[in-house]
């Protein structure tokens, strides 16, 4: 009876956590959806393009922020280690944000990607945006460790809405208004996290960071490779088949990515926080929790994947126009990939709790090779055939990765407290 009640508590608490974070993500995205028609009338395409470059740079550079030590905050065995890792991560964020600003300014002065159209003030905004983003990531992981999922949800909502509202107010400043809204929207959201952790300071304990050196050694390269694998398909298909095909793939990725972004990311955050707690306190329940979450995700992912495979080629031309028929075919081809990603990716954070952090790096190397496979295998057929090749390759990789994760979870079951 006690075990039954415990399982019921885990399920209900897990569901509440997913709803808190997933609902926050949905509400944050709602702001962008509602006000996009207004923003496109207040800002020119050139303004939006420069803002897109700014956000892309920040998105890539922020991966380096704390050298992935923020992930270790959740996995640390003791609260003392977790706080020291969080403090050290904040210290590193200050340093890497400064380097990110310098790199951006060099690119701006040399006119890379047309960045010379931006004023020097944009480089200072890069520093603050990277700083606020990095601090937010660290404090967000600390909240996940403490299973304060409602706080994470509020943080996401606040960031999404404040950013958009500021961009509306600052529209007379043109491009600078978009950049200022992006920067200070993140600051406004950061305040809610910072106030909940008064014990946090920006300080460095080198011995603690050295004990967790596996995270920058393995997880930082892994995250960079993962980012490249995510952004690679569109440039690859543009190079092989032209910009129209690349545009169709970009739309397909955006639509297919919605369930992964809304459901998968929320489940991943809650799973990671809860799994780390079980590793520290009750590792005997870890296997059941891992398999249970995977099966629930599978029951969502498979119907979505099958539905995408069958319906997208028929619905997309009607919904977006006949010129987007290729995007619908691509969405259908990506159905198996989406189902596998939705089921496996959230529970894959288990690897951060094990002594096999290098497994994620190996996975990301193969993922990048598969997404680049149309280049090194050559064009065999049209874009749909090439994308099917990538989709099936990634689906197979996810299946193999899950089997490895299953073996790791059994190892963790016998290693109370985890490896750190």
Image (cartoon, rainbow, N blue to C red):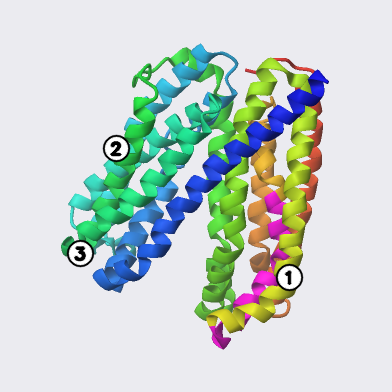
Observer-nearest of 385 and 148: 148
Q: Residue drawn at (71%, 61%), measured in percent from left and top?
A: 304
User: Left or right of 210: which side holds 389?
Assistant: right
Q: Earlier in the sequence, mark 3 or mark 1?
A: 3
* Quarter of the figure that contains the C terminus: top right
- Picture mark count: 3
Q: Residue drawn at (64%, 67%), measured in percent from left and top?
A: 375
* Quarter of the figure that contains the N terminus: top right
Q: Is residue 52 visible?
A: yes
Q: Quadrant of residue 168?
A: bottom left
Q: Residue drawn at (65%, 47%), measured in percent from left and top?
A: 365
Q: Whole-Å distance between the Cαs marked 3 and 2?
A: 26 Å
Residue 98: assigned label: 2
Q: Whole-Å distance between the Cαs marked 3 and 1?
A: 42 Å
Residue 174: assigned label: 3
26 inside magenta stretch? no
- In terms of secondary structure, where does tag 2 sit? helix
Task: Confirm or deny contact between disc 3 and disc 2 (CB under 8 A).
Answer: no
Q: Earlier in the sequence, mark 2 or mark 1?
A: 2
User: Left or right of 411: which side holds 185?
Assistant: left
Q: Residue drawn at (46%, 18%), measured in percent from left and top?
A: 83
Task: Confirm or deny contact between disc 3 and disc 1 (CB under 8 A).
Answer: no
User: Label 2: how many residues lie within 10 Å, few (<14), some (14-19) or many (20+)?
Assistant: some
Observer-nearest of 410 and 97: 410
Say which of marks 3 and 2 sits in front.
3
* Residue numbers of the magenta segment: 321-342
x and y percent of residue 369 in the render?
66, 55
Q: Mainly helix, strand or loop, the magenta region? A: helix
- In terms of secondary structure, where does tag 1 sit? helix
Query: Dot 1 corresponds to which residue?
Result: 309
x and y percent of residue 43 in the render?
26, 69
User: Label 1: how many residues lie within 10 Å, few (<14), some (14-19) or many (20+)?
Assistant: many
């Amino acid at each position: 009876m006690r075990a039954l009640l415990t399982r019921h508590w885990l399920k209900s608490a897990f569901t509440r956590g997913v709803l808190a974070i997933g609902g926050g993500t949905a509400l944050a995205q709602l702001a962008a959806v509602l006000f996009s028609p207004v923003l496109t009338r207040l800002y020119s395409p050139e303004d939006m393009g420069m803002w897109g470059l700014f956000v892309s740079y920040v998105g890539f550079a922020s991966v380096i922020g704390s050298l992935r030590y923020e992930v270790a905050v959740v996995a640390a065995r003791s609260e003392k280690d977790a706080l020291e890792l969080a403090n050290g991560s904040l210290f590193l964020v200050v340093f890497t944000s400064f380097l990110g600003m310098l790199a951006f300014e060099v690119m701006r002065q040399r006119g890379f990607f047309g960045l010379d159209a931006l004023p020097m003030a944009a480089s200072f905004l890069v520093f603050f945006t990277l700083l606020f983003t990095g601090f937010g990531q660290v404090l967000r992981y600390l909240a996940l460790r403490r299973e304060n999922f409602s706080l994470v949800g509020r943080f996401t909502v606040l960031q999404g809405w404040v950013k958009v509202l500021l961009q509306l107010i600052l529209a007379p400043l043109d491009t600078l208004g978009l950049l200022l809204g992006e920067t200070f929207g993140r600051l406004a959201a950061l305040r809610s996290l910072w106030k909940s952790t008064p014990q946090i300071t920006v300080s460095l304990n080198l011995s603690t960071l050295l004990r967790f050196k596996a995270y920058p050694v393995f997880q930082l390269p892994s995250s960079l490779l993962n980012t490249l694998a995510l952004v690679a398909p569109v440039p690859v298909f543009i190079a092989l088949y032209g910009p129209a095909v690349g545009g169709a793939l970009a739309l397909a990725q955006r639509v297919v990515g919605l369930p992964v972004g809304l459901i998968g990311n929320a489940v991943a955050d809650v799973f990671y926080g809860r799994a780390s707690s079980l590793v520290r306190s009750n590792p005997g329940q870890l296997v059941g929790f891992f398999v249970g979450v995977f099966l629930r995700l599978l029951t969502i992912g498979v119907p979505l994947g099958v539905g995408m495979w069958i319906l997208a080629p028929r619905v997309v031309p009607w919904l977006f126009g006949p010129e987007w028929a290729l995007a619908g075919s691509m969405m259908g081809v990506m159905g198996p990939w989406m189902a596998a990603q939705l089921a496996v990716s959230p529970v894959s954070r288990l690897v951060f709790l094990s002594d096999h952090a290098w497994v994620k790096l190996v996975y990301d190397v193969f993922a990048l090779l598969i997404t680049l496979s149309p280049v090194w295998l050559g064009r065999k057929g049209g874009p749909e055939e090439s994308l099917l090749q990538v989709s099936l390759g990634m689906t197979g990789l996810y299946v193999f990765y899950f089997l490895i994760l299953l073996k790791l979870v059994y190892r963790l079951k016998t290693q109370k407290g985890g490896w750190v």
